[in-house]
Every structure is written in structure tokens, then in C-alpha cells.
Amino acid sequence: MNKPRLAWAITGSGHYIEECLHFLLTLDNVDLYLSAAAEEVIKMYGFSLNDLKDKMPVYRDKAASAPPVGLFYTGYYHTFVMAPVTSNTVAKCVLGISDSLVTNLYSQAGKCRVPSIVYPCDIEPEMETTAPKGKKVMVYPRKIDLEATEKLGTFEYTQLVKSVDALKLTVLERLTNLAKLSVIDE
């Protein structure tokens, strides 16, 4: 088996999606998973699906059974990242609903004790975000969305991050710790 990889999923949130994608493109050994809404959103923010496919494997939400989730059972992935992730996906994950590619990935990662790093779009009662074409806008997440985000952060094998900087730091720390462990194992 090849060296375990990082699985990264994007849902339909535009919240700092440009920064998340730019960071993602700096990483090696990553497979990208896109919800149907993510495919639409990345285009709105000026990213090309073909350009992403040139840099890494890209899996799209096209099959009812989400076949790639089985890769968690083979040790193919060491970490699962969802960034950015919508309030809809967060709510489904909190309720244990795994009816899409991304929610299935989160569920199976947890069942296989693979750590998940999650950057939800609803993290504060008032937030500035960037709309398509670079316009800064204020958003005001609902109480129910903030409660779901908070609850998801309590789940086992789940680390919630609240900023792009925290996302970068957490992912890089995870990769560094895994690299140290692989040196010890050799």
C-alpha cells in the first residue's frame, strides 16, 4: 500500500474558500472531494475544476453509495479535512445523517478513528466573509447554526477550527506529527 494520504472535502460554502483552496494547493498527497454545491461555488470564485484535477485526484458527488468512503477502511487516509463546510453539512453530521459523499466521508472517518479537521462557515454571531467577485459582506449565522457547530466540535476524532490560520496550523501540525511518527517506524 502507498503512504496514507489526506482526504479534503469542500461543500457549498464560499466562506474563505479562496484561502482554503490556495492552502490546499500547497499540500502534497491530497485527494479532493467535492459536493455538488462545491462544484458550483468553486467556479463562482474563479477556480477551474480542470486545474484542480491537474494537481490532485478530484472525486465528485455522483454516486448514490459514495464508493470512495471505503478507502478509510484500508488505511488509505490518515486525516480527513472539511473546509469550508456549510451549515447544512454540519447539521447533517451532528445528526448522524450520511446521505451525501461528504457526510459519508465524515461518518466513515469517525468510524475508522481517522481524525477530522473541520472549518465550518458558521463560527461567530457576526462575521465578515467574501462573496464572489471579492465583495466583503457581513453575515449573521442563526443560533441553530452556531449550536450545531459547537456540538460538532465535541465529537470524537473531530477538531474544529475557527479561522483559516487555525486551519493551516492544525493541518500542518498533523502532517508534521505524522512525518515524525513515520520516521520512528522506519
Image (tube, rainbow, N blue to C red):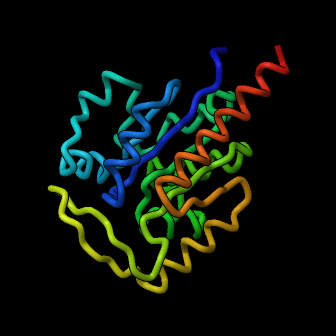
Q: Position of residue 27 (x, y in %)?
A: 48, 30
Residue 142 against residue 160 in the figure, above or below: below
> Number of marks in the image?
0
Q: Position of residue 21 (x, y in %)?
A: 37, 42
Residue 60 higher or lower than 19, as above or below: above
Q: What residue occupies the far bottom of the structure in this picture?
A: 143
Judging depth in this view, the residue of 127 and 101 nearest the camera is 127
**Image quarter (top left, top right, bottom left or bottom right) of the C terminus:** top right
- Along the line of sight, which residue is nearer the eye, 10 or 169? 169
Left or right of residue 104: residue 142: left
Question: In the image, is 46 to the left or to the right of 163?
Answer: left
Residue 74 x/y as whole percent = 68, 28
Q: Quarter of the image for the N terminus: give it.
A: top right
The picture places residue 169, in percent across and down from the top left corner, at 58, 47
Q: Nearer the viewer, residue 36 or 153?
A: 153
Query: Which corner quadrant of the image does residue 132 belong to?
Result: bottom left
The residue under the point 64% across, 25% down is 4
Q: Residue at 69% across / 29% down in the picture?
A: 75
Q: What residue is shown at x 41% (from left), y 26% (from top)? A: 57
Q: Nearer the viewer, residue 29 or 102?
A: 29
- The residue that appears at 63% across and 73% down in the rendered structure is 151
Above or below 16: residue 54:
above
